[in-house]
Image: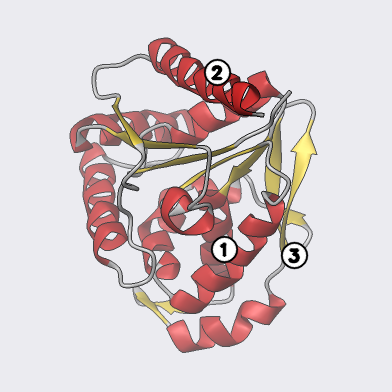
Amino acid sequence: MSKITIAIDGYSSTGKSTIARQLAKTLGYIYVDSGAMYRAVTLYALQAELIRDGQLDKEELIESLPSIFLHFTFNPKKGFAEVYLNNKNVESDIRNLEVSKYVSLVAEIPEVRRKLVAIQQEMGKNKGVVMDGRDIGTVVFPEADLKLFLNAAPHIRATRRYKELLERGDEVTFEEVLQNVELRDRIDSTREASPLKQAEDAIVIDNTDMGLKEQFERVLNLTNRVIDQKKKDA
């Protein structure tokens, strides 16, 4: 089978990871959650107290980058690869609102992005990969065979995220989550280093009124078309 590279970008809480993980499992591809990598670096900054009184010490974090090691290990029980920070599984730790609050600040640092983009590009060099994030189709894999850009209304995305956090047992309010979603949108879209933007050749999917099943079927159909065309061109 002709393997392809699939880049899925979009705003926070648009279901990128869910779709990407399901698609990778269906195709037998490698799934990489690039957002988890930035969250892991953010968790490191929090644990190392590089974020104090709501302020991130960017210079100290940059100096600490050589001490930050990330890798993914497949969990057969969960059916996807989990992220490890310095050999510790932090898949659950990186999903709280505290990490969400600061991840966009960490992700806008050019030195952080260069380090993680290099790791991501190495992971996808042999194709057969589905990667989601903010700059996958524009920076990490500008030559990706299929590029998707997911979006949804902010209040819908906040509602989805709020439900996830409540199910985890986190004590948060909907207003806090909505503010976080809107703040991350603003930071991600306006940062100087690899801002969130739609690749010119990306297919936009607005899932505001779309269920997961409908969305996945559409994405899978788009993927199969690209794979079929690749076979014909071979």
Disc 2, SS: helix
Q: Please tell me whether mark 1 or mark 3 is closer to you in this view.
A: 1
Q: Residue at 58% across / 59% down in the picture?
A: 40
Residue 164, position as x, y percentages in the image: 43, 31
Q: Given the image, on which type of amino acid does mark 1 rest?
A: Val
Q: Judge left or right: residue 176 versus residue 142.
A: left
The total number of labels drawn is 3
Residue 101, position as x, y percentages in the image: 36, 58
| Mark 2 vs 3, N-terminal side | 3
Which residue bears the numbered disc 3?
86
Foreground: 214 or 172? 214
Vertical placement of residue 70 versus 222, above or below = below
| Mark 1 vs 2, N-terminal side | 1
Which residue bears the numbered disc 1?
117
Cα gap from disc 2 to disc 3, whole angstroms: 37 Å
Q: Residue at 20% across / 43% down in the picture?
A: 175
Q: Residue at 54% across / 72% down in the picture?
A: 114
Residue 198, position as x, y percentages in the image: 31, 47
Disc 1, SS: helix
Badge 2: few (under 14), some or many (20 or more) residues near its Cα, within 10 Å? Answer: few
Badge 3: few (under 14), some or many (20 or more) residues near its Cα, within 10 Å? Answer: some
Cα gap from disc 1 to disc 2, whole angstroms: 27 Å
Question: If the image is split into quadrants, where does the C terminus sit?
Answer: top right
Foreground: 18 or 161? 18
